[in-house]
Amino acid sequence: MNKVLSNKKAIVFFLFPATILCFFIIIVPIIMSTTYSLSEWDGIGKKVFVGLSNYKELFLYNKDGFWKSVINSLIFAVGSVFMQLPISMILALFLARGVKRERFYVSVYFIPVLISTVVIGQLWMKIYNPQYGLLNTLLKSFGLDSLTNNWLGNPSTVVFSVIIPVLWQYIGYHMLLMYASIKSIPGDIFEAARIDGANGFQTAIRITIPLMKPILKVCVIFAVVGSLKNFDLVYVMTGGGPGGASQLPSTLMVETIFHRNMYGYGSSMAMFIILECFIFAFVIRKAFREKEQL
Amino acid sequence: MTFRKLNISKYAIQIFLILWAAIQIFPLYWLLTFSFKDNAEIFQGNMIGIPSIWRISNYKSAFMGGNVGRYLFNSIIVTGITILIVSFVSLMASYALIRMRFKLQKSLQVVFMMGITVPIHAALLPIFIMLRSVHLVNTFWALIIPYSGFGIPVAIIISSGFIETLPKELEEAACIDGCTIYETFFRIIAPLMKPSIATIAIFTFLHSWNELMFATVFISNPKYKTLTVGIQSLVGQYTTDWGPIGAALVVATFPIIIVYIILSKQVQDSLISGAIKG
């Protein structure tokens, strides 16, 4: 048996396609990006090695509103952890404790996750449309004309307006993960809690949530890293505007590389995004590990 | 007294849940209804109600003038082939990673696991350059290859977890019966992996069908655009005509929703297991 399982030709046969694909699609590009980020290149002419000057321009001189884009991505991250996750948590707690039509609600809440971000972006653009949009129309019909706004065209409201669909879409996803996690807790624990006289709220805080830690860790990482990487919705709804007000690192990167042909400079943004995600994921994992030890 | 309290809180919860369901669904309902209306009806009074006439002409415009049929076809091809490649390739790879024996086995497992953590942004430009140099830009392969590459690490993790649950006796019996390793894998193990293939298919489908960044950058020829990008062009074409735009959006969305309604449990389980393993 051992001999069969150590058959070198077979091993290579089985592993080759996956390894080749992943090598060229994941590993090689990272190396290439690192090289590009250290050069100045317009994609056609010669590549000129410039060391860390791209990074200097990014961080020190804040060209192109890079700082604003980073701040926006952090706002997204904060919003997703402190606004999105609590709503998902409340829904998961209610649904998992057993309500009528539980399965129905779970399925329905999850639907926005499946919809393409392009569709969601276009749809919400219509909701936010200053003349005909659903939001302004509703406000007007309640006589709240003064609150109407050019939601996506006004630099002071755009970030807030864009965050809402981003959060709306994935609430169901986090809720599903949390719901599954609660469902996997053995029922005896809840029985014991009830016998001891704990009410719903106390059970949730003292028992359910602590037992959900592993899934909570996953949710927080997804929410934060997802926010830092976010591209689709902002690209569709505002393209980063107006005037860079809703720019995110990823939209800025695409614009820099493909509209302004600054391959080297844009690659340094790409490297930044990767490092940022990596560091945050690492920090969050660490934070949860410490909590576990307590 | 206690009974009444219980009833009120149960009602309150139901109301809250229904309200929230409405919030989640309402945009879709609105989309569906305005895709059948014309501008006059939408903007002059019947914005959120049921359309008075169901204008299928909007859908006709979307398919003919707006090319939605073409985009839909392209998305199906790209996503379909990607799913086939990812399933096939990952199943084989995870079998080697879990069941076979060789040096470097552990390290390779770790490498594939790290593959999930890489955000695709870094790869955008380099892959574009690579595709350009082999003249694959503006073809289906420009999307199929990257989507497959990025889908494989997750797929390997899912199928690895599954293979571990298969009893080793099966392979030993096959071996005794004189099967080669290839026969063992293709005739015995692979057919048993159907549940994990379903999970992988769903995961891959969601990520490929809705993908925007690569699709925008790698394909500029309208003949090959996928739905996500195509809809963007269509909106540019029909800017103020909400009806056909709505129709295109519905075409992009409702197939997934219908599949989901039929297979909701599998889809949910697939995403849960993907997240936990990751």
Image (cartoon, coloured by chain):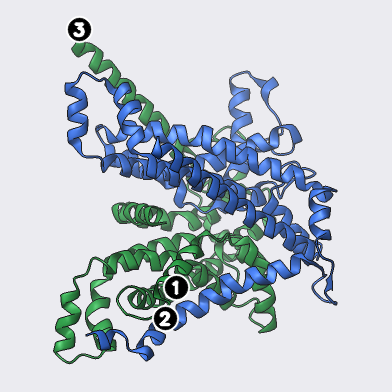
Q: Which quadrant of the figure has residue B94?
A: bottom left
Q: With A23 as the anchor, is A261 left or right in this view?
A: right
**Residue under the image location 35 percent in, 55 percent down:** B273
Q: Which chain is indicated by disc 1? A: B
Measured as percent of width and height from the top left, residue B122 is found at: 64, 63
In front here: B195 or B238?
B195
**Residue under the image location 40 percent in, 79 percent down:** B103
Above or below: residue B241 compared with residue B108: above
Q: Which chain is indicated by disc 2? A: A
Q: Depth-wise, is mark 1 or mark 3 nearer the camera?
A: 1
Q: Which chain is indicated by disc 3? A: B
In the image, are marks 1 and 3 on the same chain?
A: yes
**Residue under the image location 82 percent in, 74 percent down:** A47
Above or below: residue A106 compared with residue B88: above
Residue B108 shows which numbered tag?
1
Residue contact between numbered discs 1 and 2, judged by CB atoms under 8 Å: yes
Q: Depth-wise, is mark 3 or mark 2 nearer the camera?
A: 2
Whole-angstrom CA distance, mark 1 to mark 3, is 64 Å
Residue type at numbered disc 1: Leu
Measured as percent of width and height from the top left, residue A221 is found at: 50, 46
Whole-angstrom CA distance, mark 3 to mark 2, is 67 Å
The residue pinned by badge 2 equals: A15
**Across the whole image, how many numbered discs are drawn on residues?**
3
Q: Which quadrant of the figure has residue A192?
A: top left
Measured as percent of width and height from the top left, residue B187 is found at: 23, 83
In the image, are marks 1 and 2 on the same chain?
A: no
The kind of secondary structure element at disc 1 is helix
- The shade of chain A is blue
> Which quadrant of the rendered structure holds the C terminus of chain A?
top left
In the rendered image, what is the letter of the chain coloured green?
Answer: B
Residue B1 shows which numbered tag?
3
Whole-angstrom CA distance, mark 1 to mark 2, is 10 Å
